[in-house]
Amino acid sequence: MVEHGDIRVVHRGGSKINFREPVITNDSRLLLCASGESVKVFSTSTEECVHDLRGHTDLVTGVLLKPSNHLQVYSCSLDGTVRLWDFTDGILIKTYVIGYPVYSIYASANHEGVIFIVTPTQSDKRSELFQLVALHLPQSGDQLVEAGELSAVLSDVSSNPGAIVFGRGGEYIASAKDLHLEVYFFKKQKSYRFSLKEDNKKGGKNKFTCVACHPKDDCIATGHEDGKIRLWRNFNHKKEYTYSTLHWHHNAVSSVCFTPEGTNLLSGGLESVLVQWRYNQESQRDFLPRLGSAITHIAVSPDGALFCTSHSDNKITIIQSCVKVSAVIQGLVKGESVKTDLMVDPRSKSLVLNGKPGHLQFYSLQRDKLLYNLDIVQQEYIHELGLEQFEVVKVVFDASGNWMATVEERRQKAAELELNLKLWAFDEQTQSFVLNTTVSAPHEARITAMCFCQAIDSQTTMLVSASKDGHFKAWQLPRSAPAEDEGPSWSCDFVGAYHGLVPECCCFSADGSLLAVSFQEVVTVWSPTSWELLTTLSQPPKAIRNLCFGRLSCSKYLLGTTANNLLCCWNLLTCSLEWSTSMDISLLLNDPLTENMAAFCCQAGHTDLFVFKPSEPRPVFSLKAVCSGKVTHAVFAPREEMLESCEESSQWLNRSQLYFLTQYMDLMTFTTKAEEERLMASSKQLVIDDSVAMTPFYLLLGKHRKQGNPDTLSSPSAERTSLPQGSVAIKELLQTPAHVLPSTSFLCSMFVESLLISVTDTREEIKQAEEEMESEKEEEDSEGEMESSTSRPEQVLLGGPSAESSAPALTKAQVRELRRVKKLDHGWLSGLLHS
Amino acid sequence: MASFKPTKIPLYPKLGEKVTQDTLYWKNYKAPVQIKEFGAISSIDFSPVAPHNFAVTAFTRIHIYGPFSQEPVKTFTRFKDTAYCGRFRSDGQLLVAGCEDSVVRLFDVGGKVALRMFKGHTKAVHVTDFTSDRYQILTGSDDYTCRLWDIPNAAELHSYREHTDYIRCGVASKLNRDLFITGSYDHTLKVFDARADRSVMTMDHGQPVESLLLYPSEGLLVSAGGRHVKVWDLLKGGQPLVSLKNHHKTVTSLCLSSSGQRLLSASLDRHVKVYNTTNYKVVHNFDYAASILSLALAPDDESIVVGMTNSILSIKHRKSPEESKEASEQKRRRPSYRVFVKGKNYSPKQDDYLVSKPVKQHLAKYDKQLKKFNVSKALDTALETWTRLRKPEITVAVIKELDRRGTLKNALAGRDEQGLSRLLNFLVGNLVDPRFAPVLATAAEMILDVYRQVIGQSPVVDRQLLRLQDLLEREIDYQRDLLEVLGMLDTMFASSLPRAPVPCPGAGRANGLAQGEAGPLRPQLQAT
């Protein structure tokens, strides 16, 4: 076994953005939301991701604007820290180490210097019991602060952040769990507890799901599992409390929220309808229906102009005051299972898989962004629990990307299966797929496999579908269009069967001259031109799981895996078994661009990967314990630009990239060290550059800057003689409008400094290299001097006390800030490298 | 916010004929006028001159009808026995007819009594015609002879005894006064020249010849006999050109459309078929109530006249241009184009502030109800009489949509007698349609579940339930029969297909599975 130190498995794209309630900033320009181990900052108008606040080492569980400073934000995480960020610049300001996993975070303007967090009950960390504790934030200048000053406020609270909320002006805090609502008054230091009965007469469930407090009035709104909303008043008395009930939702209310002025109450749930209730005139309601999928969280901007809803399909919708949807931020939708398997669209090179119910999502892997959703089912989606819906279960593309075939099915309890086969043609004008043919009930039972003839130069396109009803059918597009106004449509060309056995897999050879269909333990090879059964192959009497033709130089091989852990390779020229090996392979797939094949092999609870060529006995690459659990979905995606790696072990990644889904629906991929470095360099630049919002104009400008950089990198010797860098800086300085420049006194020293690059600069670089042992640092330092105003003073500091005197504009605080920035960067880099 | 997605109405491929120019042309006739005659109508002949009256020979009479009259203009009754083959002369003045009593009579169209009687045949005369010089008459008889007669002095000019069976059809050339062709039950067609005393050409049809037709150019001859219609090229010495076999009973009559582009054939199988004379494909088909004996087209295809064995004469007149326009106008009952365009073509001026109005999505009635989750009302609108009868696919699509939403039971329940009977009526009408059966079977089950306790309370509903049961029983029997036929076909195909040996992999692993495929391979066309 060869060791491959430089190929790593990394997470790629599509983290959850609907995990916690998003936060809209005071100026309504940015939206912050917890996304996996980072906090993402989106622009509310352009939907672009502006920053990615990285630093937490575990799931981020809450985001909260700092009440005293609206440009800073707290985030809490399961790694036991609360971090304070400057989200406009995307920098970490402070880290408070708590030491217990934090599940949610609350703060109020009335309680300065105190935040409230939910942690597991301290006595034992594993228990399901949670408590709300107040955390006094220590006033200290250090970046890393131990915060141990905890005082319990409420015990036995819910870990759901929507179940705890601050009341009017922070006077009280309300917490709901199961059937109890508890209100704690800070002044009186007293809590009241109200309970509901388990079930009411009609069998509805009374459990609390979410709480909201009126900002001006003493009123608490609670959502319940049976779809009711209760408005509680007079709750500062134990006995004389009252509540009124609002009922519109027919499933559990997942979120309630008051607008900042308290005039309206918003609620949402599974129905995917945003309901707006007038406060005190609850019979008047406004609806915003068909938001796509179940609402999980609702947030309102501090000025009340924007609402935003998170949805269960990993989507955040931004709504302008309950009238119209202004922006949709869509992440990669990951349901419980990916029925369609992973596919790559040959045209856009995007990943295609199940998206919203009844849709396919096209997800760009390069840009980590959802391109679009394609409605396959084209039916009104009924949001109701327990209703059988049409699901897209199969999707295949032909080699050129001109045709796509989808299968949708719906299985009712008693009735028979409903199947639809749809064929979509790519429309050049609209740049998307247009429905060409619908075949209802193409087979009598579930379709097990489908494939297009992959030969590019063939005259006709052919699709083969195999079904549990014991037949496989070939579908063809007639070559000449019938003389009618509508275009050609697909029709069945051939129905094949083999001894009444059930076909499981089908596969076309690379040139389209052979079709292999596996019928349980027998592989049959057909000629698609004459529909003649050419030969049958059967090795060990066990059902075939996967079937795959070799490509390019290995096109004479047919590979199959069987249920009794055997990988067989048949030579189609001699119709005999070439080799076989015993492996428990869960997935076998071929790279469409090379002759490599990848086999995911499940062993002792985790998966190993083997990459091999059918003609060579030694695997090209193997990696043990890629991830835990079984890998059932994987795909080779072609790269945009070829990598030029000469190492033998990583050559297989040169032309395409292997993506796979783990058991927990994480999208992972393999990267080489060189690629990672390149990626890091570009992301680094982004982090430092970002001082303005990501607008299209900015992107244009950013590109310009990036182009400037390689010049300076490539010619360090020329730099010294003619100072081209300095002249660029001067030019930039002169061209920048005066009103956006800092004060002249501040600039002056820097400007002079920029002209004085000589011995100190190189020495500094060496020093830094020694200090941090990082190669990228050099790149960063040799970026343009005027690139950012922070990089220059940093060097000044390190240069020594003599430089400090020349920069009197820098205050102590600024110096501290800069040092912290520097430290932050290093910590982040080393963390990435060592993980 | 996505908009409401309307219910998908599946497009079913239109069964039956495709709409072509021919279909439009031949369908453009009014409902037929039917006239009862005294016996089977053996011959119809249009007068070549202006009012284009036509002579209908039936039993012992010949009636002459005007182009639009329903009553005969004129009747010739002086026949002792069944009359045959009343024909007009090319000037429309004289009419000749044969008779079962072997006498050929010549009438003036204005008079009543026969002008001349040609006696000489010994058996029934089925064929009579004028030669193109108007002075001679051609007759063919069951005594195997055909003769030429001189009209002025009623004398027999010639007698040809070449056929060996009854002569049942014959035509005289319109271009050459000496040329005529006869067809006989001895399967032959013979071309005679009056100047020669023998037939000049003989063609073998293969079946007893029932009808003959000459093309206007007289280069092609069409003969009908048995189930075949054959076209002969006379210029190539009687070479067979095409043989058409589109009827499943004896073809009795032939005729050409006025343009000469279409050939019509009538048969005992109650169909009239229209052929394209360039490729001899059937382009249209008429159905009639009884076996057809005679067929004639008025000049300019103004009317189609068909005589049948049940002694009914059916006359179809072509629709006048106003009438056909009216029909098409009735379909267009929408607001005028002006209403839609109103204000749309106004281009905003420079200082105008454009208030954009959201485009309102047009929804069908049932979709409006579905959008509001009014399931019962949605089903009611889909069951409205017009939709139910004309567009059952809409009703079925709504039922399917309700089923998908899981609310079909709610929509079906709670109906009164009238509503339920309407539902059952729809089921009875459409349940056995293979396109709708899967959806309607579920609905039918639900209806029976929901309304089980009301059985026996209403005679209307009970009757319909019984009808439904009866229908299902018949359908089951029918399906069983079909399966039997399919099984028989399978065995026939399996035994007739050559069994190709499949090359076995050389591994020597005889697993007994590597054999040719036994099942039939039927390409299936799928509805799209």
Image (spheres, coloured by chain):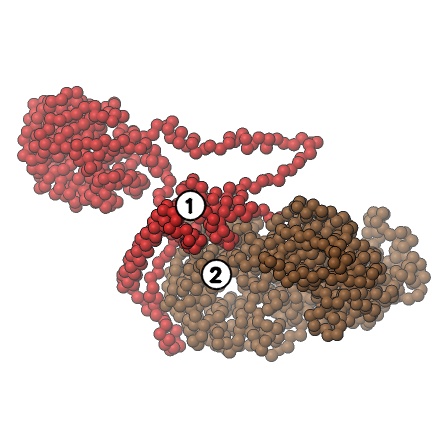
Chain colours: A brown, B red
Identify the residue at image location x=21%, y=23%: B73
Circles 2 and 1 on the same chain: no
Tag of residue A413: 2
Which residue in the structure is indicated by mark 1? B417
Identify the residue at image location x=91%, y=59%: A811
Q: Position of residue B525 (x, y in %)?
A: 38, 53
Q: Residue furthest top?
A: B110
* Foreground pick, B234 / A500: A500
Is disc 1 placed on a helix, strand or loop? Answer: helix
Position of A409 compared to A292: left or right? left
Please identify the quarter of the rendering in which residue B218 is found: top left
Mark 2, Cα crowd under 10 Å, few <14 / some 14-19 / many 20+, is few
* Foreground pick, A33 / A597: A33
Amino acid, disc 1: Glu
Mark 1, Cα crowd under 10 Å, few <14 / some 14-19 / many 20+, is some
Amino acid, disc 2: Lys
Identify the residue at image location x=66%, y=46%: A283
Of circles 2 and 1, the one toward us is 1
Q: Are marks 2 and 1 in contact (CB under 8 Å)?
A: no
Q: What chain is tagged by disc 1?
A: B
Position of A698 compared to A289: left or right? right
Position of B68 compared to A401: left or right? left
Q: Position of residue B82 (x, y in %)?
A: 12, 33
Is disc 2 placed on a helix, strand or loop? Answer: loop
* Foreground pick, B186 / A455: B186
> Does any portion of residue A293 appear in the rendered image?
no
Q: Position of residue A600 (x, y in %)?
A: 56, 72
Position of B283 compared to A599: left or right? left
> Does any portion of residue A600 appear in the rendered image?
yes
